[in-house]
Image (cartoon, grey):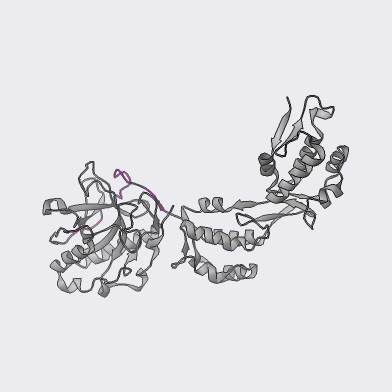
Amino acid sequence: MSDRITRTDFRALFQDAVIDVNDLKPETQRALESVGLSVDDLRSVADTSGKITGQLAADQLFLFLDDRLDYDGSLQTIIESDPASPLQAGLTKAGVAIQALSDERKLSGRIRAKDFVARHTHGGFDLSRLTPADTSRLKALGLDMAALGRLDSDNLVSDSGALQRLFVLIDRLDKDGSPQTLATTTLHRAEETFVATASGQAMQILDNVFRPYDQQFTSYVDLSRALIDTSVSPVSIDVKHIPQTDATGCLDISTDMVKSFDPDAAAQLPAGAWDAYYMVRGEDSNGSIVGFRDEFQLGREIVDFTLDHGRPVIVGLSHSAEHFNLDAITDHFVVITGRRVDEEGRVYYDFQDPATSGQEFSQGRFYVDKDSGMLFRPPACTTDYPFFLNYQVTQVRPYADMVKPEWQLARRNGSSVID
């Protein structure tokens, strides 16, 4: 029974390889000559520099071998071996050529757009970490720095759309003619080594500023990861609970709770939708949030600072993948009123939830993830709204007269959605 290679498998074998027709090994040339092929014959499918590389060239090489050496009548398969063949190991003429060229090929580094996005989904390129030397090098390579800066408003390139646009920018440095792949290395035949292409060099520089998320898409159905710290000093602020009367009034009602506690403090609350510190960088299709440890911890520090100065804190949270607010990530608002430690030594923050009715049901607890610093409330084993929801804090809304410059308010990173 004869063995065949399909056009698809042949393409996969050769499209990410480099074959330099002008520098074939002597044994390769002898094998090709034994089946009637010369170096000049191969030049008909090579580029002007004598190289066969890429998907188009792989297809042309397949059709060339199929036309010259294969006679099975199909343009989609080539017979590589046949028991009736008089050649060594039962190879056909086409099989001899394919084996010789396969041994000759040198693989170049190549990455597809979809693989680039998948590889970087669980983090982001932090452009603020680029050094002046990095920036100069990227400019010298030809990267469009203005377009790079427009990929994200807060210097982090993280959601799938921005990652795809980043790939396009890097791909413009590549000369393979394909918008779906780029070569990161190319073969230096004189030294038999691979060297980084302009695209590859740009990717290396950017990979150095890639930050994987410390918090990734966790649903938190239990308290196994809650922070234990018995040294935390307790704070309790008496804030009257007010239930919301419609589905969209949680921020207004949270503000009313603060106003009932201290009208002067309420006057210092942010009026704009973006006047908040965002602790998160995005959410997945289930509404679970992602972010960096230092940003979660700074959000918690803002909460602690406010509580320690005797004021409650309004925070936003995510509990689903729905986009109920302008930042496309925050679903609900509550008021944090205290900080304590439970009987297991776990730190938690009391909050008043306007989505509940009745003072006895209004209190909730945000626990602290011991690894990332994220504030969360695990869902309860009930079908009662909103207790079955998984709360994860997305933003803190500090008072204007307490804001510190390093808090970086109005950062719009909450709009990043992960596919």
Looking at the image, residue 252 sits to the left or right of residue 136; the answer is left
Q: Position of residue 392 (x, y in %)?
A: 31, 53
Quadrant in the rendering for residue 409: bottom left
Q: What are the residue bounds of the magenta stretch?
A: 214-235
Q: Is residue 272 visible?
A: yes
Q: Is residue 54 visible?
A: no
Give the camera-side residue of 207 and 111: 111
- Residue drawn at the location 37% of the way across and 62% of the way down: 414
Q: Where residue 28 sits: x, y (%)?
A: 83, 42
Q: Quadrant of the N terminus?
A: top right
Say which residue appears at 60% left-offset and 54% top-offset. Answer: 180
**In this image, 212 relative to 256: left or right?**
right
Q: Residue at x 62, y 68 (%)?
A: 137
Q: Nearer the viewer, residue 354 or 11?
A: 11
Which residue is nearer to you in this view: 33 or 148? 33
Q: How many marks?
A: 0
Question: Was residue 63 drawn as part of the magenta stretch in this picture?
Answer: no
Q: Is residue 110 left or right of residue 396?
A: right
Q: Position of residue 99 (x, y in %)?
A: 77, 37
Q: Is residue 311 above or below residue 370?
A: below
Residue 92, relative to residue 149: is it above or below?
A: above
Q: Residue at x 82, y 51 (%)?
A: 43
| Main secondary structure found in the magenta portion | loop
Counting from the top left corner in percent of width and height, residue 154 is at 43, 67
Compare residues 187 and 407 and report the one nearer the observer. Answer: 187
